[in-house]
Image (cartoon, grey):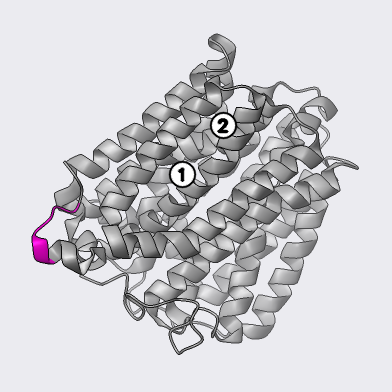
Amino acid sequence: MRSSTEGSAGGDPFDEGAGSILRQPKAVWATAGASVVAFMGIGLVDPILPSIARGLNATPSQVSLLFTSYFLITAFAMLVTGFVSSRIGGRRTLLLGLALVVVFAGLSGTSGSVGELVGFRAGWGLGNALFVSTALAVIVGAAAGGSAAAILLYESALGLGMACGPLLGALLGNASWRYPFFGTAFLMAVGFLCIAAFLKEQPKPARRTSLLDPVKALGHGGLASAAVSAFFYNYTFFTVLAFTPFVLNMTPYTSGAVFFAWGVLLALFSVVVAPRMQERFGSLRVLGGSLVLLAADVVVLGYGDHTTAVVCTILSGAFIGVNNTVYTELALGVSDTPRPVASAGYNFVRWFAAAAAPFLAPKIGEWTDVHVPFVVAGATAAVGALVVAVRRKALTGEAEELRPRHAAEDGATVLAN
């Protein structure tokens, strides 16, 4: 089984030595830069959700379908990404994904109804799936410093994108809710040019990936356990991302500032804090504890006053950042399945929750009250932690590699009972 800490275990990923994530080829930086913009597209609409609802005379649950269509298509597209990239190559797959995002992000800005916007976001989701899943494989394959440095670089791009997306959405969306979509199309076009200029064609895999390979990969108990736990976690994650803006009910600027702070914490805890915590306490212990804390945080968010809700929204970024890093390492390292196939199978499962949460959370709020969606989100995070605890033996192979040495010598368990 592979070690996801290959190349930098126990070291500082930002050290200027050979293992630093800062010393990378131009192709890696071009791919990571485009990844930042790709992830910006996820949180871009957060500050402008109320503005879109007013501009298109739509309800919160209708506007939340922007996330649902995006991630539902993304989930199914995970079965296609490996099939496509193993036939046309990683570079062409990245460019195809970027081209689709440019087209559908631009079309999103021209929408005359919420139905059109939801449809264009679905096309955007297909392009993003082709790009994001392939980008991870390209970065892991081309990055200097081993797979651990590559994963941290990818998580850095994710965190920076998630932080800057709401900020861009607020700055452009204050004038019109349409401008953030046009802005994203422009930035992705720049990313397209950078990839075309700096990334050479990647070697194709010896064996072509079939459409069912990601599903077959889930037959591995460890990968399936990571995917199921991530499914419940993602429901919590995207309840915060898609439903909280309606609860906070702020202007685009203030909402953008809140989610920018949220994204900064997400980035810092993904790249700086999570690796140190894993080295000290072990990956499964860290993941289980972070999920429990996230569960408590979102429940307090739902029942607190406005100031408390703002603080808890920002604080959730810390727990989400830790979770994202650990889940990514588990998905890529827990089995001997080729990384692109393992990533596709894992993402195929977890993105369904990202599609469900934005639709169900507003509906649950309409059926009950504004507090209950956050109770449900807290419960799903707790279930994710329970899966980690119950399935720790299936996940132990990966956790052994990330466990602190003194814990191994003492014979301590990976996850506290």
Percent coordinates x, y for residue 29 in the rendering: 60, 78
Disc 2 on helix, strand or loop? Answer: helix
Q: Residue at position x 54%, y 46% from top?
A: 317
* Magenta highlight on residue 107: no
Q: Which of 409 and 77 is in front in this view?
A: 409
Residue that numbered label 2 is attached to: 358
Residues at marks 1 and 2, CA–CA distance in whole angstroms: 12 Å
Question: Residue 188 vs residue 27: left or right?
Answer: right
Q: Give the range drawn in magenta.
A: 409-414
Q: Give, as a three-letter code, the residue at label 1.
A: Trp
Q: Residue at position x 46%, y 35% from top?
A: 236
Q: Residue at position x 35%, y 53% from top?
A: 345
Does residue 123 appear anywhere in the picture?
Answer: no
Q: How many marks?
A: 2
Dot 2 crowding, Cα within 10 Å, few <14, some 14–19, many 20+: many
Percent coordinates x, y for residue 392 in the rendering: 18, 48
Majority secondary structure of the magenta segment?
loop
> Which label number is shown at residue 83?
none
Disc 1 on helix, strand or loop? Answer: helix
**Quadrant in the rendering for residue 199:** bottom right
Q: Which of 56 and 311 is in front in this view?
A: 311
Q: Which of 259 and 398 is in front in this view?
A: 259
Quarter containing the C terminus: top left
Residue that numbered label 1 is attached to: 351
Does residue 10 appear anywhere in the picture?
Answer: yes
Q: Give, as a three-letter code, the residue at label 2.
A: Pro
